[in-house]
Image (cartoon, rainbow, N blue to C red):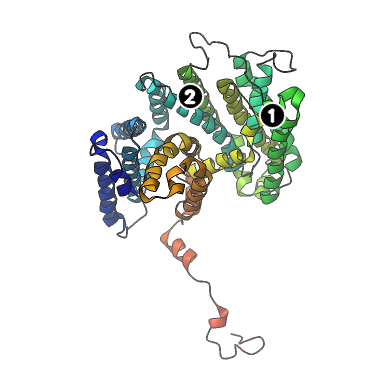
Amino acid sequence: LTLVTFLNADFGSIGPGPWVTLAGGVLVWLAGRGLFDAPLDAAPEEWPRRSALVDVALVVVVELLAFALFLVGIAVDDPGEFLGFFVALTAAGATLASLGVFKGLAGPFYRLEAVAIGLLAVLLLLFPFTQAGNTFWIQVTAQAGLFVLAALGLNIVVGSAGLLDLGYVAFFGIGAYTAALTGNALLTNVNFHVPFLLVVFIVAPVVAAIFGVLLGAPTLRLRGDYLAIVTLGFGEIVPNFFLNAVPLTGGTRGINPIAKPESIGPLSFGQTDQRNWYWLILFVGLVSIFMILRMYDSRLGRSWQAIREDELAASSMGIDLTRTKLWAFALGASFSGFAGALWSSAFQYVHPSQFEFTLSILVLSAVILGGIGNVYGAVLGAFLIGSFDRILADRLTEPLNAFGARIGNEFLATHNVGTDRYLVFGAALVLMMLLRPGGLFPSKQRAAEMAPETEDVSVQEQQDLFDVRAHDDATAGERGGQVA
């Protein structure tokens, strides 16, 4: 596929980049195979502290390198070169993961968590200045940031409390319609206007949290599949309500336009102010991550983990199951309300079709892909899935069309990879369950639960059970068998 695609390309304008990057990636992968195929004495471990300066240097170098690779990747306009870059990067990442480099780097990053988050925040803050007036990638990353906010909220419900919520997108829609109704009195029957900041940080999250409690209260005694079915029904009811409540929501027309948010100092938030929207979403995302990390380390967060592991044991230890579960539903819904309010204000349009069941599955897939229970894993998974349509799908469609035209296949010549998003996400989840059940970045607790404590335990877990039918017993055919 790659060779035929490159043969169809104009090498005068492309240059040798695709061949060099593709060959380099394959060579790195083949070289790594000889290393990680050999049996290792022990599983990869986090690198121990050598000195504070070494840890800081590792964190800085890794984050700067990752940021530089991201900038290089989005700057590649030619689909052929991007395909070569993507293959090389994937091969190098797989090799480093197999060699235990990522596991080793987890040590310095965990020890210097505040430094890593601070440096990443600075790099993301400076990202718009690297685009030289090009707002496309700024808008793409801002949309991915909204998806990250929704995934952070679902990670509270599913990852921390262990409550399978399949109707999570309903709270996203509730936040979006709350912001639209209170910010656009001229086009709705809501005859009052609420300031933008108050809507985003107070009104929309509180309204979504209230509906989260209303959903959680009747489902307190449900677990597993039964809870998933009830939440799925709630997720289907809310969009249908928006569709049929025509006097309030506009029905199939939706609400458009929505009142322009007020300026915050020198920052205005019009349709062309993509940089300011990016900074606002980044700020809300960083505040959300800080709040969630503090909650995980609190008594409430530990109660969520106890309920996830064993409700009966948690109740026996004095944990109030009712209150703890309701807090999980309410706080998870509030972060989704955050994202919904920003969504409607940024895009100036809301419609019931934007909040269908498939969006809940995408957010859940992001949490599973990144690592259930890990905040940073949820952020990575949401960014990967949220940016698929704009980055991978667009860049891979043209090589596929060129290949189809080359071999005379009309389907491949006209096919859009973006329409295969659910196939790609499903295949990614299947591979993830087979290769890394904990996700790309599982939490330490879940990683410990999935890994055996010692080699002896690993051997015992993999050995066959004793088969009494195969036992050498002369009286095996007699009733009762031989008594020792």
Q: Quadrant of residue 114?
A: top left
Q: Is 400 or 177 nearer to us in this picture?
A: 400
Are there few (<14), some (14-19), or many (20+) residues within 10 Å of tag 2?
A: many
Residue 443 appears in view: no
Q: Position of residue 142 (x, y in %)?
A: 48, 26
Report whether 127 appears left or right of 283. Answer: left
- The numbered mark at residue 147 is none
Q: Looking at the image, is mark 1 or mark 2 earlier in the sequence?
A: 1
- Which residue lies under the disc numbered 2? 282
User: Which corner quadrant holds the C terminus?
Assistant: bottom right
Tell me the CA gap for discs 1 and 2: 32 Å
Q: Circle 1 sits on which residue?
A: 252
- Residue at 47% of width from left, 50% of height from top? 432
Toward the top, the furthest residue is 265
Residue type, mark 1 in image: Thr
Asked which secondary structure carries label 2, the reply is: helix
Q: Tag 2: residue type? A: Leu
